Amino acid sequence: MIVTENSCSFGAGTSWVVVESPSPEVGATHVSVGTSVAWAVTKDNKVWFRRGVNAHNPCGSGWICMVGEMIMINVGPNDQVWAISCEDRMVCFRQGVTSSELSGKTWKAISIPRDGERSHSSASANSTQSAGCFFSGEVQDLSGVMDVDSDTERGSTEAAFGCLTSTSPDLPVDATSNLPSEAPTSRIPKVTSDSFISELVSDREPGKASRDVGSAILLEEEAVAGEGHVPPLFLNQSSGAPDPPWSNVDLEETQIQHGQAAADSSSLSSVATYTLAMEDAYGADERPLWAWVSGGGCSVDSHSPLSWFTCSVNTSSLLQSIQSMSLSQTAAWRKQIFEQLSARSKREMDDFRHYEQAVKQSVWVKKGAMQWWRDWKPHKWVDIHLALEQFSGAEGYKDGILFIYYNYYDEKKYLHAFINEVTTLVPVLNESKHTFAIYTPERTKQRWPIRLAAATELEMHDWLALLSVSCCDSRGVHGPPSKKAIWSTTCKGDVFVSEPSPALEATPYPAPCDQMFWRQVGGHLRLVECNSLGVVWGVGYDHTAWVYTEGYGGGFFQCLASSTDNIYTQTDVKSVYIYENQRWNPVSGYTNRGLPTDRYMWSDASGLHECTKTGTKPPSPQWTWVSDWSVDYSVSGGTDRDGWQYAADFPVSYHGYKTIKDFVRRRRWARKCKLTTTGPWQEIPPIPLSDVTILPCAAQSSVDLFPVWAISNKGDVLCRLGVSTLTPAGSSWLHVGTDQPFKSISIGAASQVWAIARDGSAFHRGLVSPLNPAGDCWYHIPSPAKQKLKQVSVGRTSVYAVDENGNLWYRQGVTPNSPQGSSWEHISNNVRKVSVGPLDQVWIIADKVQGSHSLSCGTVCHRLGVSPMEPKGQSWDYGIGGGWDHITVRANSMEPPHVRLSSPTDSLAAAPHTSLQSARPTPPLDSA
């Protein structure tokens, strides 16, 4: 429960408000509240963090289960968290707690010394064990001198911690003050063993031992017949004051012979330490079991390193004890250790160096059974056996080969792919099979990847994760993407990144686009936008905005190749559409009986595939239905009150009203499905977005704040304020007024903002600057003749746009003095989307590209020959595809290397075998 309206003037509050337990069936046992956080522990020892706690919402918004099990928890004055672990009862501290990440990152155990360990009068037990563990021998007759310091120091450094101990079953702890004055002699075991670990006493004064010998009390083990338990003897009872709880008694070898020949057990003095005040629940070298912690008086700076985790108490005691030894004390055992290690090394290593190594490299093989889409006609799924062979050479690199074994007319054959040649692994959208594709540069040119299908979704994810990690290992690519990475998404919603090389934009010989390596990042998005400072935003199919958290992995990479933090749950919702088609006849009007040449009466948008309500499935097995079929009235062109659109025939343009010439009609049905996954993305509530763009920056830019422009799903133009590398999500939205709804927006390197309205016209925002991030007014830019624009992208000086018919347009005449340009120039057709980088690089998603084996839809293409003197470029280079839906190169601000072209004189002077390589010929995109 929580007290409401609590303040400094009225600390008792006004009433109690019930906050639901983190786990109602178990119940909470402990709760601790800080400035902006609340933590709780339930009866099953699980730790819970209350999110959303602030001054406006003191109850918070929900519980989050954290990793680890604790028995209690406490929050400090600056929201730092302390706890006692359940398993080993150690004091733990929550690392990584900051104002931006109040839940922290991980638990760290703290080594806390006991009072006795801090006394300078006795050496650490662990130190002496470490020093004496290499000596052996039997102490036949050992007697010692009890030496009790009257001024035992007790540094009270454990004020914030309580130590859990168990006292003797026969003598309670509080019985020390009630002991009789005439107590029997205490029974202390004789110290004898075959391998005695001696205590090193290095700081004892020379005269102290001889001074105490005369008054020493000889302690030895005696069996008293007929007597019960004899309580321990307390030596200072005569003084009237009890001993401190931790009193150390050193038993030294005496130099006086007591009538028996003492065996020479060691060159070091033998010492044993006992606690006389009470019996410990742990020995001298065991740690305490903590029961309570309170950090209310401890303010920890989250940005300063803490020394508690770098040097434990036992390690510190060991160093102090060893440093205090004299050379004569340490020389013997050091020499013996060195001799033993040298003998072992010679016995186990040196004598076998001339032997040949049995294994020079390690080989690891994973096998499985799948189906393969056959390369030759008739194409069909065939059963195959899959084997991934991984090996690591002497240099430590990892590589592998993927083998696919199949039968061809009862003859066993195989095909293979080298892992270091695989450019990407892509999950394929398939309603009935768990399918993924493997691309290499050669198969990218052919537009014919290796397509495999697993029996289950889990098996497909296991193979995808394993193959992806193998590909990254062979190329040395690990961790999160760089700030200059190229991001893209597929039509399935998967997110991919590629690390650009400096030669990618080199002129005149750029690196081939089909050799780029793409790796998948967890999450599910419709589009991604970024800049070179590492700020990445994404938009899902349900128009939810997401910001990148600088993690990697998630999804099916969670258990194999994923960062441990910055991974969050992500959901996405999309609609599946089918069309009900009808034709008019004079007898019965509109019916579902069409002509033999008509499309299916229930079909997809193209009419080529039959799609019924009962037969239509979610896009993939990862999706689940969350609604029923319903008529969709939000169709382009409008509908009547029943959702029908009319036309003269299939397929032509449709309108929402019936005329005398309309002989066919269609109605769109929609059903929503939901996907739940994980990835390095955090949600940015609460406004749903349809498009987003981030200010592109130079490689060495020192911009602190930069704007993010967006279009809401209703068509409103928004500007996000407070976006920086430290706060990539920004702080607030600024609404920018428009006369009509917009659908696309882009901001260039010089803060020039272009947008596309829903009617297909273009607009330019004037006077946008860091001091005036929203600008002042919109300037209308006429669209190309008889065309409606749908998307725009702005670079450093170039402005490109795509119309609804797939044509790519370049805006001529854009200068600082004339930012609106003069006219549109047609560049190419067959274009789905365009992305212009901060250096005016031009990349597109081509709609259809013909390969040597098949036609691919959705292919990444790179414009070649782009330069300040030739901003429109010359030709296209084809990359990965198909199935790609979006790409952004607005983070790639690497300047291309300058290639010096050889002159004819240099060619004549060169060696006969040297020559310039010609650029790889690529057909124009228009011919695809």
Image (cartoon, grey):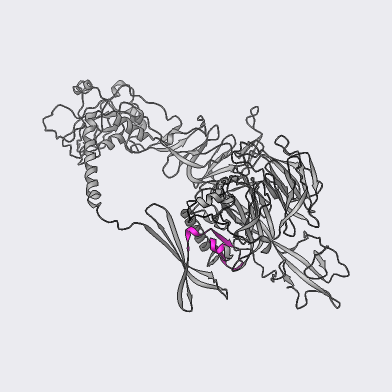
Which quarter of the figure has residue 210? top left
Q: Which residues are magenta?
A: 416-444
* Residue 666 locus on image (x, y percent): 78, 68
What is the x, y in percent for residue 175? 34, 31
Q: Residue furthest right?
A: 660
Dividing the picture into quadrants, the one containing residue 250 is: top left
Q: How many marks?
A: 0
Relative side of 840 to 301, left or right: right
* Quarter of the image with the C terminus in it: bottom right
> Residue 640 versus residue 80: which sits nearer the camera?
640
- Residue name at image x 19 percent, y 23 percent: 213
* Vertical comparison of 135 with 371: above or below: above
Q: Nearer the viewer, residue 415 or 270?
A: 415
Query: Residue sitting at 37 percent across and 26 percent down?
Result: 154
Q: Position of residue 432 (x, y in %)?
A: 60, 68
Relative to 307, is 602 above or below?
below
Q: Which image quadrant is residue 448 in?
A: bottom right
Looking at the image, which is closer to me, 118 or 699?
699
Q: Position of residue 702 (x, y in %)?
A: 61, 36
* Residue 457 seen anywhere in this rendered image of the structure: no
Q: Is residue 423 magenta?
A: yes
Q: Is residue 723 magenta?
A: no
Position of 299 with respect to 684 (left or right) is: left
**Quadrant, the N terminus:** top right
Q: Can residue 586 be seen here?
A: yes
